[in-house]
Image (spheres, rainbow, N blue to C red):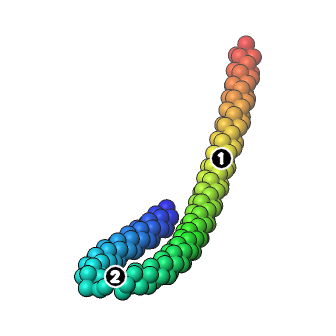
Amino acid sequence: DEEAQRGVNAFEEAKRMKQREYRMELEEQAEARRLEEERLKQQKQRDREYMDSLTEKEKQAEIAERKRQYEHHEKSRELFARQLQEKHRTDDWARNEKDREEKRLLDLADMKDKEAAAAERAKRRAMQEQAVHQRQAVEDQIREKERQKAEEREKDRYYAEKYKEMVEDQDRRRWEVEEKRRT
């Protein structure tokens, strides 16, 4: 029972650690997004100042170049997002697989604990049954001894009665013999 509880506690602790790691990862992502937004604001401000200093033709050329860079950057971001999503999916799969394995091991340990408990109960039950049989055997022996004693008492009573009858018979004969002598 204690072993199973320790296993459950270890499982719960591992689960809390994973949640903590996931939470920290989300916080890091949020911080990275915040820093990126701040960088983009500053970049926009510099761009505005730079664009204000250019002529119209230079502005058009700069806008076209920036559009090309932006599209390239967006494609890179999409690729990175897909890669990150795939990494998370893989991490989640690995985490789930590890959780399943831990649960399977806990279930296996629990089954072993249940089997050990069942074996212990069977052993105790067998010991109790053996104790009952021993008690019954002792009680049977006691009853047998009491029966033998009762038979012996009965025999003793029978022989005592016979002896008494024999003594009475002898006394009666003596008395009869003495009566005949007197008469």
In the picture provided, is 108 more to the left or to the right than 8? right
Give, as a three-letter code, the residue at label 1: Gln
Query: Along the polypeptide, which appears first: circle 2 or circle 1?
Result: 2
Instruction: Where is residue 62? Give x, y as percent.
Output: 39, 84
Q: In the image, what residue occupies the spot 44% across and 81% down?
A: 64
| Residue 101 in the image: above or below residue 147 | below
Under circle 2, the secondary element is: helix
Q: Nearer the viewer, residue 152 or 39?
A: 39
Q: Which mark, by number, is residue 136?
A: 1
Residue 134 in view, yes or no = no
Marks 2/1: CA–CA distance: 115 Å
Instruction: Where is residue 145? Give x, y as percent.
Output: 66, 45
Are there few (<14), some (14-19), or many (20+) residues within 10 Å of tag 2?
few
Q: In the image, what residue occupies the spot 25% across and 85% down?
A: 53
Q: Quadrant of residue 46?
A: bottom left
Give, as a three-letter code, the residue at label 2: Glu
User: Foreground mark, 2 or 1?
Assistant: 2
- Residue under pointer 2: 56
Q: Quadrant of residue 67?
A: bottom left
Instruction: Where is residue 181? Give x, y as percent.
Output: 73, 19
